[in-house]
Image (tube, rainbow, N blue to C red):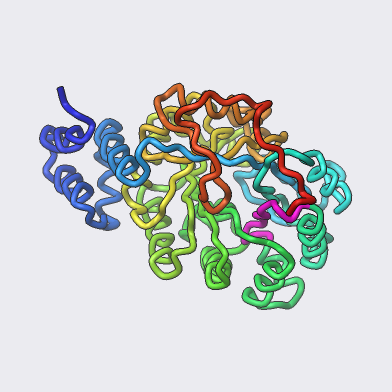
Amino acid sequence: MVTAQELPARIIEHVGDAELARIGEKVLAGQRLTEQDGVTLFEKGSLSFVGALANWVREQKHGNKTYFNRNFHIEPTNVCVFSCKFCSYSKLYAHKEDGWELSIDQMLDIVKKYDGQPVTEVHIVGGVHPKMNLSFFLSLIKEIRAYRPDIHIKGFTPVELDYMFRKAKLSVVEGMQMLKDAGLQSLPGGGAEIFHPEIRQQICADKVDANGWLSIHKAAHNLGMHSNATMLYGHIESYWHRVDHMETLRKLQDETHGFNTFIPLKFRNHDNEMSNVKESNVVEDMRMYAIARLYLDNFPHLKAYWPMLGRQNAQLSLSFGVNDIDGTIDDTTKIYSLAGSEEQNPAMTTAELVALVKQVKRVPVERDTLYNVIRDYSANEFNEQSAPVIDPSLN
């Protein structure tokens, strides 16, 4: 019987392609893959080959642990001045009456819904509304921090931040410092899409470019803040565009070490200007996760966003390099449901999420935003009613 440790080497023995065998040997030796290696894996690597290697890397880094957190989303608005062709979420400012705009009080009411609950993160992201400027969001962050000082505030993509900073006539460093001083603690990974201008010009020409996205994350890292990174895959890009994107992220991570997690985001074609583009299938999705795990050797974590993939495919991804399936998302976040994701009402209780992970023989580990372990669920059955209650007044 072949052991789990022997399996990747056994697959290399029988791969039947000298170039893939060489790449597999590099992976097992802990050597960095080149851009050409990455392209070769996409072009020639079978799902079983890249999956076995990615699972081996995953288990070398994290064993059977699968991380999640208790979080909720605030989406201030879906009104946006930009017109990304892949977006099913935003309403152009000219048609703002078709969208929603939340006041600071309304957003605080969302926070108050979680009084006494052990959520650890609020995730704030939405459209780019000209009236929701830097001053507006500084006030929001300060209000949340004052009301719920124990909760980690993660918010705003570089698309939103670039607009805020330019409108306020501030440099990126100045703007990021003001947000940090107000209480912002980390950045999500959105807005990256595909970095290469050849693709970006076709799908999101009017918003911040790759250099702008990278400069904002670099500034955050230099201020001691962590962030995530994404890539929107499975539309008009070629394999080399994906590798170029990951190479760009890998270089910045070498410099700053500020990224926690890479999150490949599957393109969805529902109700947007790219509805003619066929979506990737589950085999291609799993290959994407696996190759990302192999290529991004300096990223600690690889996340599958379960509302986008659906629960069963999220479980499957845990055998293809993924070690994080995001959070409970105890709300009705609209960004992906409007795009035709598998989960139209994306919320899971902690007990449901723990069971989801255990069903595929992985160990659920609750974390905070920075991957500090809150609870390991490897042994005991979890009862939602027995969860600790956090009193904000004690912090």
Q: Residue at x 37, y 57 (%)?
A: 298
Q: Residue at x 41, y 52 (%)?
A: 300
Q: Nearest the camera: 226 or 91?
A: 226
Residue 19 visible in the shown view: yes
- Which quarter of the figure is the N terminus placed in? top left
- Measuring from the top left, give residue 282's x and y in whole percent: 43, 29
Q: Residue sitting at 26 percent across and 55 percent down?
A: 33
Residue 157 inside the magenta-drawn segment: yes
The x, y position of residue 24, in whole percent, is: 19, 44
Residue 317 in which image quadrant: top left
Which of the pair 354/327 is nearer the observer?
354
Q: Is residue 372 above or below residue 375?
A: below
Q: Quadrant of residue 41?
A: top left
Residue 15 drawn above or below residue 261: above
Q: Is residue 48 left or right of residue 148?
A: left
Q: Is residue 145 left or right of residue 12?
A: right
Nearer to me, 391 or 196: 391
Quadrant of residue 224 within the rendered picture: bottom right
| Image quadrant occupied by the C terminus | bottom right
Residue, far front: 394
Which residues fall within the magenta stretch? 148-160
Residue 65 in picture, x, y percent from top left: 42, 38
